[in-house]
């Protein structure tokens, strides 16, 4: 039996793979032709102003980033807080996300709303007028928001280049085909375009679980 060095084996495998590839194809061309959209699943979380950080954690406190999120400039913090609604049944360990905001915002799922007995509207992030009240409990204090609790709408972050590729613009609404263990169609998914965004569709845990998908799953625009 002939014996081969590791370098020879690697070269043989490389040649075999090259012969199997379709004529004229390349990884770059495949990536360009890919019209699927990656999924990011958002668990319940909290955005805070500096004023509310001071109340919840102590005057002059700074949030501690521990992990960058998929969207540039966004990060998960070490800090977690407790949410309380009219049911008085707390949801503990709710992650704070950075950076700081101009208005504090709590994003939960429909399932969470049943536990808390709050009635948050389905909204675009930052659209808080008339949203649900919620109480946030921290190690140093309590913040009672008269409004600020929402269920985030399904939306897709895109760069201007991605928007041109998909033929959409900021503020458009599209339908999305979701092929998970429970094949489904999501209607009225909002397009959000910015040069600060990276291509990704955001859904909450209820949506992801219902369709049988998770982080890294891919969806397509429905025809």
Image: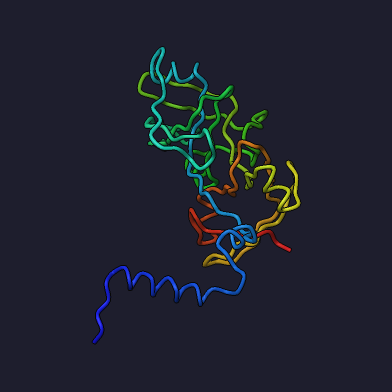
**Residue at the spot 28% in from the left edge and 69% down from the top edge:** 6
Q: Quadrant of residue 130?
A: top right
Q: Which part of the image, by quadrant, shows the C terminus?
A: bottom right
Q: Nearer the viewer, residue 115 or 206?
A: 206
Q: Quadrant of the N terminus?
A: bottom left
Q: Is residue 47 above or below residue 12?
A: above
Q: Is residue 208 above or below residue 8?
A: above
Q: Is residue 164 left or right of residue 78?
A: right
Measured as percent of width and height from the top left, residue 29 is found at 61, 61
Residue 198 figure quarter: top right
Q: Residue at left 41%, top 13%?
A: 60
The residue drawn where x is 63% and y is 47% is: 156
Number of numbered markers? 0
Q: Is residue 97 above or below residue 40?
A: above
Choose between 96 and 141: the one closer to the eye.
96
Way the structure is coloured: rainbow
Q: Nearer the viewer, residue 117 or 107?
A: 107
Location of residue 33 in the rendering, given as x and y in whole percent from the top left corner: 65, 61
| Residue 46 drawn above or below residue 156 | above
Q: Of all residues shown, which one is farthest toward the bottom? A: 1
**Residue 176: % across, % down:** 66, 58
- x%, y% of residue 124? 65, 38
């Amino acid at each position: 039996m002939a014996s081969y060095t590791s370098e020879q084996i690697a070269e043989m495998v490389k040649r075999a793979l090259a012969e199997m590839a379709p004529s004229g194809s390349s990884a770059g061309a495949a990536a360009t032709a890919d019209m699927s959209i990656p999924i990011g699943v958002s668990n319940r979380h909290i955005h805070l102003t500096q004023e509310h950080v001071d109340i919840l954690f102590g005057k002059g406190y700074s949030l501690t980033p521990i992990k960058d999120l998929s969207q540039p400039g966004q990060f998960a913090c070490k800090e977690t807080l407790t949410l309380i609604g009219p049911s008085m049944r707390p949801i503990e360990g709710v992650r704070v996300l950075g950076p700081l905001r101009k208005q504090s915002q709590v994003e939960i799922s429909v399932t969470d709303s049943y536990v808390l007995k709050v009635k948050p509207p389905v909204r675009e992030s930052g659209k808080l007028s008339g949203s649900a009240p919620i109480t946030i409990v921290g190690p140093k204090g309590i913040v009672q928001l008269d409004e600020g609790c929402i269920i985030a709408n399904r939306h897709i972050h895109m760069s201007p280049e991605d928007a041109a590729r998909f033929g959409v613009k900021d503020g458009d609404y599209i339908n999305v085909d979701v092929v998970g263990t429970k094949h489904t169609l999501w209607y009225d998914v909002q397009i959000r375009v910015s040069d600060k965004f990276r291509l990704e569709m955001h859904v909450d845990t209820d949506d992801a679980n219902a369709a049988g998908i998770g982080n890294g799953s891919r969806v397509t625009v429905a025809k």
